[in-house]
Amino acid sequence: MQFKYLSFLFLFFITKLVSAQIPSGYYDSANGLSGEQLKTALYDIIKNHTEYPYTSSSTDVWDILKETDRDTANPENVILFYTGWSINAAQEYNNGNGWSREHVWAKSHGDFGTTMGAGTDAHHLRPADITVNSARNNKDFDNGGSLYIDGDGATECYSDADSWQPRDAVKGDVARMLFYMAIRYEGENGEPDLELVDQVNTFDLNEDGKGYMGKLSTLLAWNIEDPVDSFEIHRNNVVYSFQGNRNPFIDHPEYVNEIWTVTSTHVINEPQIKIYPNPAKDYLNIELFNNNPAKGTVYNLSGEKIISFNITGNYKLSTIGIRSGLYFLHIATEDRVFQFKLVISKLDS
């Protein structure tokens, strides 16, 4: 154990020297692509990463997580993912009194266990409270349920029979980790083929060598509602220093909608919503086909909120103060979340 500790200290100091910038040219092969072409290009960029064992006397997943999720206010501790609680990093499992390693993409959804590869990929492994981790189990992610109160206190997480809703501060983190897994693991070289679908109870969909997670529409919304923050950026850099690959959706959040959101830049006409004109110049009409209230939000490509507004019936949104460019329009109704690409163009036709 002393050798392992000294190895960890050495790696800790080495990772501090790693540049916080995306390596020059890292995403060049993905430039200008979308859909399946972008998905394939990103897979080629991030595959073949350096793998570490789950538990070992040398550098293992425990050691990596002690650095990726270190509590900056108390460097002896790690931050537990679902709760935000801080716990002594050296405790590891400690006979159930310490912390555990949560597979955000549940390991049973692809049957990869803790084998090197998907089972030890630090991009989706996070420190977690042991009993909270057990409560999440292998549930899909979605909104709703009842507040989960652990023996150590309220968690800000919600749960029901088939889904888990994490605290607001990490909803986007969850989404971007799952997006990464769905790109990184394509069934090549004996690895599982992982796919995101727009439903829960995805464990029932499992096939030999193939696993599913959901709920995609909720994850797309969380990606926008909880943008990338400094902790997530630092974590991506540290994982890169160990594994040699990055999470593209932390570096480029706009890739998410280029792969998973299919919309038109003309009139958008959903069964419940119609928006036009698109591209918009000075205004955007939004028509709800019922009288239920909804909330609208416009985000830029970096996930920053540009404007938010409440909608009832028909609504005319002024876009005069919004610069030309591509944006994402997020409309949350009582029972569904809609996401659209929105083009603002100040040029005369």
Image (tube, rainbow, N blue to C red):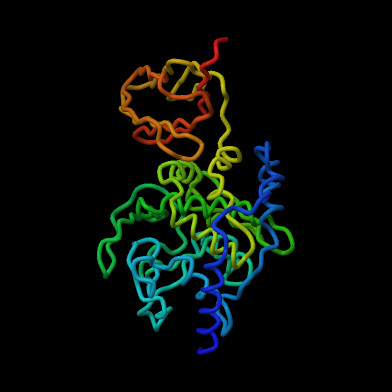
Q: Picture coordinates of residue 47 (x, y %)?
A: 69, 58
Question: Which residue is depicted at the point 29% across and 53% down?
Answer: 146
**Which residue lies most toward the bottom here?**
2
Q: Is residue 76 left or right of residue 243?
A: left
Residue 147: quarter of image? bottom left
* Residue at the top extreme, as displayed: 349
Camera-side residue: 301 or 134? Answer: 301
Can the viewer see residue 194?
yes
236 is higher (above) or lower (below) than 214? below
In the image, what residue occupies the spot 43% across and 38% down? 304
Q: Tag count in the figure?
A: 0
Determine which quarter of the picture holds residue 127: bottom left
The residue drawn where x is 40% and y is 62% is: 81
- Residue 321 lies, in percent from the top left, at 40, 22
Quarter of the C terminus within the rendering: top right
Q: Quadrant of residue 315?
A: top left
